[in-house]
Amino acid sequence: MQDNMMASSQSVKDDVKPDLAENESTLRYETTTKDDSNHIREEMSTDDEQLHTKNDTSMKGSINDQAGRDDAKPIPTPIKPNRNKPIGAKLSQSLSDRARERRVPSSRLGRLMSYGSLAAGLGVGAMAEVARRGMGLSDSSDKIGVLDKNPLLSDANAERIVNTLCRVRGAALKLGQMLSIQDSSMINPDVQRIFERVRQSADFMPKAQLDKAMRTELGNDWRNKFESFDDKPFAAASIGQVHRGTTLDGREVAVKIQYPGVADSINSDINNLMAVLNIWQILPKGLYVEEFIETAKEELSWECDYEREAASSQKFRALVKDDPVFYVPEVISELSSKRVMTSELVSGAPLDSAMSLDQDTKNFIAENLLRLCLQELFVFNYMQTDPNWSNFLYDNATKRICLLDFGSAREYSKENFVDGYLRIIKGAADGKKEEVLEWSKKLGFLTGYESKAMQNAHVDAVMILGEAFSEDIFDFSTQTTTQRIQTIIPVMLKHRLTPPPEETYSLHRKLSGSYLLCTKFSAKIQCKKSLDEIWKNYHFLNLEAAPTSS
């Protein structure tokens, strides 16, 4: 179960991830208007396009602050905000100053050539790293991550991967984004910092490409449907980029626009990336990569369907409408389509910018996010499975957390999966190894024919993860969970006989991301209380899973 959870860094799940910056920059666009058939040469250039910026402190402050707007249109009278809506955040979202304006390579040939160049570059980089290590010039002694032993994942090659992924965007960019939020015991901190750039700052479309995408989705007169629209995005990542706008009736909105070619290139992008990884044998054996890839392709097709995401967002909005902490923005249906999604703009800061908050506030955020995870799985049976910190905006003024990005939201069968999974978690929390083993077999984590070493390793790892739910107050600042599980993973990769249940690829990605956030926050929270509340009020559909006594 948890070997999949720890390996969830391989997952390629994400959508738009905003970054936080104290000052935004004003962009001067220099674009071309070539026909798409002439873009192959342009797509293969990674360094010629330059982003011109100048300081513009007028954009500083809340993303809902209208002061300092450059557009000449008068600002309409704002609609009175919902009292429950997060407002007045002192921190803002803005595009990272490291992001560059570069055309998205939309042709298959252009994208394929990018991966070919990456494969060749990795080979050259690996040979250079081997030579450096042979001469004692590499500082590999402090590389403690599991992946660092492979010379193909040297710092120089990590930079090559980042540059390629930031440029092509789409499905392949997910790998780097997920690597950025894993514990440093999995990845060397130096490499992790490089992947952090991927999470925070994918490149963004030139104005001409943006306009073409909007005309395709909302019509040639799309600008007339907005009172104002900022051509510069305030967020950009793997699937698309987000712009600030104002509707004709005065509502502040966020307009998410999908990159051209991304939806049509999911299969080819993942296949190309996996070909590169397989050629150089970067991935360890025992991960059941084929099953993972098929699941990833399905989930990415969901993320590229903004109509599905809009429906998921509205469903989740209804689920948390009475929650005192969580809020989901309203979707503006008349300004949304298959590749464009418009929703109300809310204030708040991504959680990675909340590290400077006081410890009580960080404990509050962590405890509520853990509570939400348990509710999503065991109460709603419906989960937003992307743990990227930028999907959660904290408003310090209202003490509320805004939830974003429902492209990867999915249901879990209560009778066929959730009931049994709760028995595993509760068994681990109560220290019942036999119960963990029994339900691990029933759910398909184990076949029952594994060696004793494999069964023990699996159960031990689950018990370690269950420690957080066995104490009244769990201190994430002193936990050694990752380090202890690291010693178990080699046994599991060697002796595992079956891939984990399909549901766990997305579920463990979300749970591991939430666990890491609690660790980064050094949170001290009542995990056991949250689980006990779930257990007390839970109703089993699977009668076999129902305990004889509660």
Image (cartoon, helix red, strand yellow):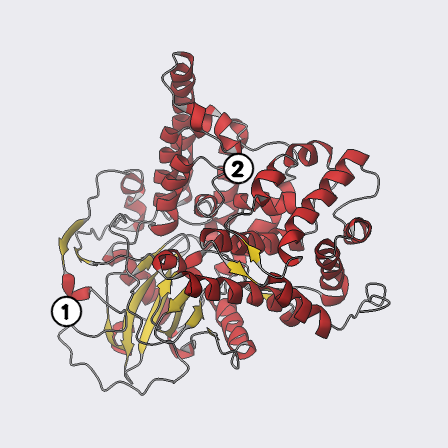
Residue closest to the far front: 472
Q: Which amino acid does label 1 sit on?
A: Asp
The earlier-in-sequence mark between 1 and 2 is 1
Residue closest to the far top: 135
What is the distance, in whole Å, between disc 1 and disc 2 at their CAs? 44 Å
Please state if 94 lies on the left or on the right of 173 as rendered: left
Quadrant of res 537: bottom right
Does residue 56 appear anywhere in the picture?
yes
Quadrant of res 180: top left
Quarter of the image with the C terminus is bottom right
Depth check: give the residue in front, 441 or 203: 441
Q: Where is residue 70 in the image (x, y as percent from the top left)?
A: 14, 69
State the residue at coordinates (38%, 85%): 82
Please state if 378 lies on the left or on the right of 33 as rendered: right
State the residue at coordinates (72%, 67%): 414
State the residue at coordinates (67%, 57%): 470
Q: Position of residue 200 (x, y in %)?
A: 35, 51
Does residue 451 appear anywhere in the picture?
no
Depth check: give the residue in front, 241 or 284: 284
Q: Where is residue 154 in the image (x, y as percent from the top left)?
A: 41, 28
User: Which structural element holds mark 2?
Assistant: helix
Is disc 2 surrounded by few (<14), some (14 to 19) or many (20+) residues within 10 Å? some
Please state if 517 lies on the left or on the right of 218 as rendered: right
Depth check: give the residue in front, 149 or 51: 149
Which label sits on residue 274? Answer: 2
Give the residue pinned by disc 1: 70
State the residue at coordinates (23%, 58%): 22
Please state if 481 lies on the left or on the right of 76 as rendered: right
User: Which structural element holds mark 1?
Assistant: loop
Q: Position of residue 455 (x, y in %)?
A: 78, 40
Total labels drawn:
2
